[in-house]
Amino acid sequence: MSRSAAIWRILFGGLVFAVALWWPYAIGRAEPLAPTWRADISGKLAALSEPTWKNLEPFATPNLAPNCRYGAALLSAAQANWLAPLGAGWYEDFGAHTPFPVPDAEFAQMVRVRQLKNACTYLNGYEISPSLTDSGLGALVAAQPGALWIIGNEPDRGPNSENCLGPAQDDTYPEVYAQAYHDAYQFIKSRDASARVAIAGLVEATPGRLQYLERVWQTYQQRYGTRMPVDVWNMHLYILPEARPDGAPNGVANTALGTDPALAIRESDNKAGRCADPNVYCWAEHDDLSVFAQQVVAMRTWMKQHDEQNKPLILGEYSQLYPFTDYDDPINPTRCFLQDEFGKCFTQTRVTDFLNRSFTYLESATDPNLGYPLDGNRLVQQWLWFSISNPSGVGFVSDLVTRDLQSLSQPGVAYQSFVANRPTYVNLLPVQVWSSSNFAVTPTGTLTVTLSIKMVNNGNTSSAVPFTVTAYGDKALTQPIGSVIVTTTIGGCVQRTVQLSVKWSGLTIGTHFFWFKVDSTGVITESDESDNVILGQVTVYPIGLWLPLVWRS
């Protein structure tokens, strides 16, 4: 078996099979998927059945304060027990359902999409799960106001050309994905205006994948006559070659559906000298942090080019996928399944080093020209490690927890340690103020206007303590106009905006300045107390009589 064929068997068959077999449990309260979503890997993988998680003893590992920057993927309900010990502030499990009872960890719902086919021929239509019905997705949206909904999972990744009916991810051409996204977005927003909708994460941010994204964007504009509405941008980041050295599909990442094959990143042909070629991804570059950073910047650059810089970007899935042990003998600790071009294996020690380096980069990566202004110009707002445990599938070298789900693995210890050493903090930030309109009164009259403010929390943890927001009529903040007490929890990582209003009475003709201060009574300890005030103004005009101008010849 060739190395690329072996990697195909690991990366593609394993992941899809694992997710497909677990999926019916995960979305048991939603619409089931069609049988064609399942896969058969000839008995090489055991079905992922529900483990005996209900009877597990409490963990000895202490819980950490949840940090919303850090997330983890789950492949069983039992794994949710490990979110708190890891300090993970969010999670996803590739489905949509009622969230697991994990305090202070946000569940990212995922709506799955797949293009219809007749045998190997793609049709102009799609199937979606949960279904866009009141009893399907509608019931979930109604029960989870303000949730994050990811529409699709790697739709760019079709099946290997050698087996066009074989397993894939969401396997949808960009033009059809644009339609599915539109329909799901409109369905969700019509039922919950506070919902946040995210685009699917593509396998990686290579030139070919960005062309896929561009075609989605352009198709949406052309078909619906408006910009594609995206609340949260999403990317996956796996440094995977997309084609063999001769350009043929390699079964690892594969050329993105509907894109120019010439853009596909090539394999190295196991030649270390080719690793410097920007059109090649060596096996050794799977954990190359410079390439990792290039993909993040490429995604943020695309966003800025499309006037989407002022939106959050999440890294919805990443880790190391290349195995150390043989896939058919995963418990053999001495057998190196894959060596890179320099003869090095993908051990847990190597994965742990990558985890630490990538976390360090994501925590510090900022750019005023590309980053999200409301989040201190960070390039990425949140990131999610794959996975807590996937012992029967792809990426098990990156597992955070041992197979019996009783203790942390080496990467898991590193994850927990890194999060534990990042103090959690809240930072409330006012981002916008406005008045209801410009007004006109008689020369001796007065009026009352509505002043509004929008704020976020760009700290790394939620703020649940009630606090006061006050509007003032002077810069010294000594003349209060009105106050509102905020009692709702405000998630960190700029997850949500909070909007509130006060009335200002007795305004006369002229321009009136006002100042809003969040946490005006100082009950919240924030990382930056100097950014809590924002300035606005109201202009009141005199009522005038306008007469037409008549010319006489």
Image (cartoon, rainbow, N blue to C red):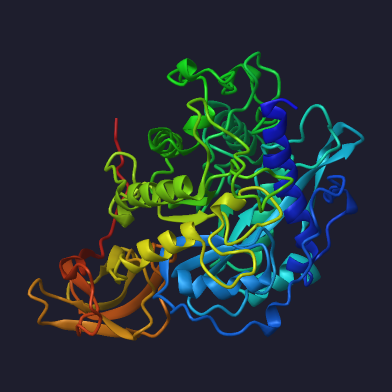
Question: 254 and 394: which one is in front?
Answer: 394
Is 84 situated above or below 165? below
Can see residue 346?
yes
Can see residue 170?
no
Question: 318 and 151: which one is in front?
Answer: 318
Looking at the rendered structure, the number of numbered marks drawn on it comes to 0
Split into 4 quadrants, where in the image is the N terminus? top right
Seen as rendered, the residue at the extreme front is 334
Seen as rendered, the residue at the extreme left is 476
Q: Is residue 191 left or right of residue 442?
A: right
The image quarter in which residue 440 lies:
bottom left
Horizontal and vertical percent position of residue 260: 64, 20
The image quarter in which residue 301 lies:
top left
Q: Is residue 434 left or right of residue 15?
A: left
Is 95 situated above or below 214? below
Q: Residue at x 48, y 16 (%)?
A: 274
Question: 9 and 149: which one is in front?
Answer: 9
Horizontal and vertical percent position of residue 33: 83, 57
Is 240 situated above or below 95? above
Q: Is residue 478 left or right of residue 334?
A: left
Q: Residue at x 31, y 65 (%)?
A: 422
Seen as rendered, the residue at the extreme top is 246
